[in-house]
Image (tube, coloured by chain):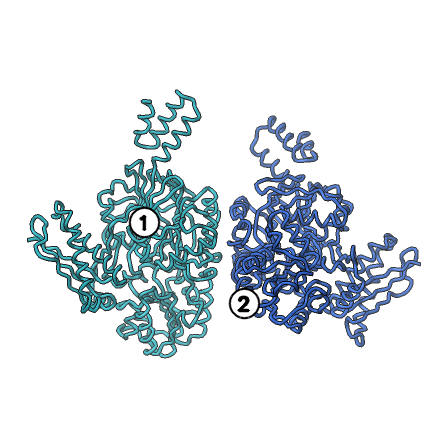
Chain colours: A cyan, B blue
């Protein structure tokens, strides 16, 4: 009996195994072994918690926690990205995940893993690396380089290890293995995360590209073997779940570049995400074939292509690249410009050219501009305005609405997603990297494959799922908010104003003013002001209910009222959620708590 | 030294291993181990030989031989099918593979394996099972049942074992494992054949159906694991190599049946291959949903659905099926007829109905006929004539030219085929089950994936490929001919005549008459007669060349001339090949050798 007590109170698995051995030496009884096995297993729990990347697509950040009983033992974090892809080019007004939940648990964070090098998966590192207690980072080659460069811009050093695909990594009680897959950037990985309650297949952004222009095809053996060994939960990219069929191979785009370059008598412009190194490399190879000198324009484009060049992922003879001020001095049919700004960002290199604000580069008739990326939902207006401007300047603009094979999505379509389901055959599913619409469609695919709706969790930010051996259930929802980053580094106030005006113009704003005394007691009735949100006349009841909600939140918590920060946060979240439920919109919510 | 001689002359691998142990006990030297290893391996050779199924698509039969030095040790045969799918319904005029090469080697045949239950893979069993020395047959459940029933029709018993997917079978030096895949018939398999020189992935007819309506999805783990362990040669279905994308899942057809049945006020006819049990089952389930009584028409249709019902693959409540003479007695919108004859065969159940020759069944306005199978190349005219006849009788006929989702091919398209290439990642490729056109397109896919043209063998019937450890080269071509089977069992002379007339009308005929003396010496110049082949006027040179060819063949072989049978065979083959090369057509060639 004493041994069993000692056993159950042992702090980690190794102790337990040791004690189990001691026990077994004394009582050689199969029943005891079975009981102890279940005691060990039943005691472990894993909690999964997305801090971003669900519903909003971007700012991906996922937390895995291992509990022994109720004691949090180990935390593993996958990705730490920013909202608005390419927003770094704008330099201002980013959204990053809310990591306040983690702040008092940094001593449990065993590692920070990254799936691939896109901004929406790595962009928040400079803001959070220190706050997270500088955990060791593990990721693939190109991703490691991108993160190191990004950190260096912020004068930070990161503790980063370039992973070996054939190696199993142990972080606390997590066993981790990276799996090579394909996407629109080289060195994209999926991550197999084994825990005491079961294995998680963390499968963000991917497509099954059987003919990737560079790098290896997906490692089907590792994927299928993971499935064969048993997957408790598959976390899968869901962004392409509305598209039928298989996503086109990245390599179809190379042929299109060649065809278009052949037909173009003037300058050839290509714009895409600056991290899409495979796409850029295909354009570079076509340019070399047609003897066009290559110019990279835009800060992120230069940085990323430099970085990729350094590790041999983008080999270009030095003589074939040029500087901006040479462009107009060589014949236009000898020029290929690879330009940042495919999402219509206001101050991007391409937008400046379109507005005729680049002193070195003029668009002339005969020039061609190829958009080799689709607008991200929400950016359509800006992209179409940019296309309009470029056309006005005389360029022939080609984009995916008028030409199919300009952009092969980096995200798997329905058949890619179904293959991954079949390969891994999990007990549970969590679609990630998509909006609610994509999650729903993903669920439909799973049902088509014979799974039950109940096997799939559709999560919002801050939602949690508890996993025990062979079982999963939804847990409490943690409070998370959008964290806005205003102008870091080379900020431009004009753009902040512009962006704010955009947000306000689409969703409006709500300000809640709360005045309390030193004891945290409401002194006056909370006051709510709005602009551009709903037509206020006839909405008295709506605002009345909002006020009542604030009063209700304040009432039972008089004791802790002095923590103004967390109170503001909670009120903000509740008010935001209240208006979203009531009117289906997300105005900019500001809560001001004044203590007098 | 004596040991090494003894070693090399040891007759089988076990002896060798034993002797190697003896050797090693004496000289403990790594070099010796390495040398011996290579001596063992270099001695083994495997020869692959298609007796059908290449170029001609149907009458699939593949021979694997293991040689130790020059001594043939073991033969394994995969499939033994007939030409003209569904030809068994006609009962006459089949084409079956030429197995004369095997006739003096039956004692080496270790097993006869079948990949699935389609006629073009199993149909020649009754003709050859005894000639092959009654080897043990191994195959999946439904296939075993179909073969057993077929043999029973011919009053034969077959020694058949229903395979277990989790089991490794050993046949001589062959190690065999069956892998569950998907096609248009349940229980379709691929076969992993391990030999001393390497592993062969024998992958005939398949598609990767992620949502098969019945049965399991493909066992990706076994496929990918085979690839991971190393594949020397992939033998892959190539029939769908011209179609882009992935082949549709069989389950899309079920929805189409329901939609069409809902719209149909009259009788509902569906025709497809009688072995396509999954398709038939989907139609049956739709009929049950719409309260239509089910009638099976046609001998093969009744047989196959009975067989599938017996093993639970086609469960239908007895009360829901009816006999032909009831059809006109119940309301037309309560009738569903599942009818053989989708290829337009002249005396099939459907053709008889179309010609108004079935006393029990009349087509009326409002009736609908669904063709849920595409015409096999060569059958188009017959199928369109049948559609015409049915329409004339007043039926609304739906076929895949006018409705896309009536027939999901059972064969993988380009992406299915590329997935299989990636999964197995072989050193060599042999496309099977397709014409030269398909083989070429398949090679293009392999090249797209980065393989070399030289890694792929495009074979014709009788061609051979020799495999040694890590290497392959094309060997001699064996002489094979089409073997025609005239009217077996319930023959109908009218149809033989009809079929002959069809062949003659499309390709014409050539008769070569050769008269020799007792010594085999030509007495007169060979004479060639033709009808319907080429316009003879102005073709003097062609026939002159053909005569010279015959003279040339006869000249150097005077010694063996008395074997008239094999001489006729060889002459036939050479003449056929000569005219095909000269004019691109394959007339019916008959060679008559008269000895006086």
Image coordinates of residue B352 in percent, x first then y, are: 71, 66
Q: Is residue A332 left or right of residue B125?
A: left
Question: Residue B590's mark?
Answer: none
Give the residue at mark 2: B263
Give the residue at mark 1: A62
Q: Residues within 10 Å of mark 2 (few under 14, many from 20)?
A: few
Q: Are marks 1 and 2 in contact (CB under 8 Å)?
A: no
Name the mark nearer the viewer: 1 or 2: 2
Label 2, secondary structure: give it. Answer: helix
Tell me: residue B491, above or below residue B423.
below
What residue is at 87 percent from the left and 60 percent from the top? B593
* Letter of the chain that mark 2 sits on in the rendering: B
Which residue is more in the foreground, A341 or B60?
A: B60
Which picture quadrant has residue A296? Answer: bottom left
Which picture quadrant has residue B261? Answer: bottom right
Whether residue B48 is visible = no
Q: Are marks 1 and 2 on the same chain?
A: no
Image coordinates of residue A51 in percent, x first then y, are: 29, 51
What residue is at 21 percent from the left and 66 percent from the top? A533
Determine the residue located farthest toward the left in the rendered image.
Answer: A596
For the N terminus of chain B, give its image quadrant.
top right
Q: Is residue B264 left or right of residue A337?
A: right
Whether residue A5 is visible = yes
What residue is at 31 percent from the left and 72 percent from the top? A386
Q: Residues within 10 Å of mark 1 (few under 14, many from 20)?
A: many
* Letter of the chain that mark 1 sits on in the rendering: A
């Amino acid at each position: 009996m004493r041994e069993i007590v000692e056993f159950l109170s042992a702090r980690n698995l190794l102790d337990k195994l040791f004690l189990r051995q001691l026990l077994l030496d004394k009582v050689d009884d199969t029943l005891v072994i079975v009981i102890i096995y279940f005691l060990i297993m039943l005691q472990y729990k894993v909690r999964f918690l997305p801090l971003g990347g669900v519903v909003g697509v971007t700012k991906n950040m996922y937390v895995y926690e291992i509990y022994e009983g109720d004691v949090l033992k180990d935390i593993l974090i996958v990705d730490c990205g920013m909202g608005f892809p390419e927003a770094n080019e704008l330099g201002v007004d980013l959204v990053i995940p809310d990591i306040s939940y983690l702040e008092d648990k940094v001593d449990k964070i065993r590692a920070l893993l990254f799936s691939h090098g896109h901004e929406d998966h790595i962009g928040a590192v400079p803001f959070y690396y220190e706050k997270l207690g500088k955990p060791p980072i593990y990721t693939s080659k190109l991703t490691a380089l991108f993160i190191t460069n990004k950190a260096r811009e912020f004068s930070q050093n990161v503790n980063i290890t370039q992973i070996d695909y054939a190696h199993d990594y142990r972080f606390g009680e997590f066993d981790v293995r990276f799996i090579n897959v394909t996407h629109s950037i080289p060195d994209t990985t999926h991550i197999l995360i084994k825990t005491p309650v079961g294995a998680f297949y963390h499968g963000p952004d991917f497509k099954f590209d059987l003919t990737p222009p560079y790098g290896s095809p997906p490692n089907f053996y590792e994927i299928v073997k993971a499935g064969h060994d048993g997957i408790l939960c598959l976390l899968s990219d869901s962004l392409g779940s509305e598209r039928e069929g298989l996503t086109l191979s990245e390599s179809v785009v190379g042929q299109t570049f060649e065809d278009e370059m052949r037909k173009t008598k003037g300058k050839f412009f290509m714009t895409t995400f600056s991290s899409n190194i495979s796409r850029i490399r295909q354009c570079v190879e076509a340019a070399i074939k047609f003897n066009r000198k290559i110019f990279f324009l835009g800060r992120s484009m230069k940085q990323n292509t430099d970085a990729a060049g350094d590790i041999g992922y983008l080999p270009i003879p030095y003589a074939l690249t040029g500087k901006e001020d040479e462009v107009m001095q060589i014949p236009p049919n000898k020029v290929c410009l690879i330009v940042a700004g495919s999402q219509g960002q206001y101050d991007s290199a391409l937008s400046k050219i379109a507005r005729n604000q680049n002193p070195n580069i003029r668009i002339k008739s005969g020039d061609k501009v190829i958009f080799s990326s689709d607008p991200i939902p929400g950016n359509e207006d800006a992209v179409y305005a940019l296309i309009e401007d470029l056309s006005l300047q005389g360029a022939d603009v080609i984009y995916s609405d008028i030409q199919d094979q300009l952009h092969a999505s980096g995200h798997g379509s329905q058949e890619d997603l179904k293959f991954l389901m079949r390969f891994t055959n999990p007990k549970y599913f969590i679609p990630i990297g998509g909006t609610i619409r994509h999650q729903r469609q993903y669920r439909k695919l799973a049902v088509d494959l014979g799974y039950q709706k109940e096997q799939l969790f559709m999560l919002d930010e801050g939602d949690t799922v508890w996993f025990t051996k062979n079982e999963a259930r939804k847990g409490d929802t943690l409070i998370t908010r959008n964290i806005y980053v205003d102008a870091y580094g080379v900020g431009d106030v004009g753009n902040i104003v512009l962006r704010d005006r955009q947000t306000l113009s689409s969703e409006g704003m709500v300000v809640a003013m709360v005045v309390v005394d030193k004891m945290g007691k409401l002194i006056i009735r909370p006051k709510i002001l709005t602009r551009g949100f709903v037509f206020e006349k006839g909405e008295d009841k709506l605002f009345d209910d909002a006020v009542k909600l604030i009063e209700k939140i304040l009432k039972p918590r008089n004791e802790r009222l002095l923590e103004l920060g967390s109170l503001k946060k909670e009120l903000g979240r509740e008010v935001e959620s209240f208006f979203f439920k009531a009117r289906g919109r997300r105005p900019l919510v500001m809560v001001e708590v004044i203590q007098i």
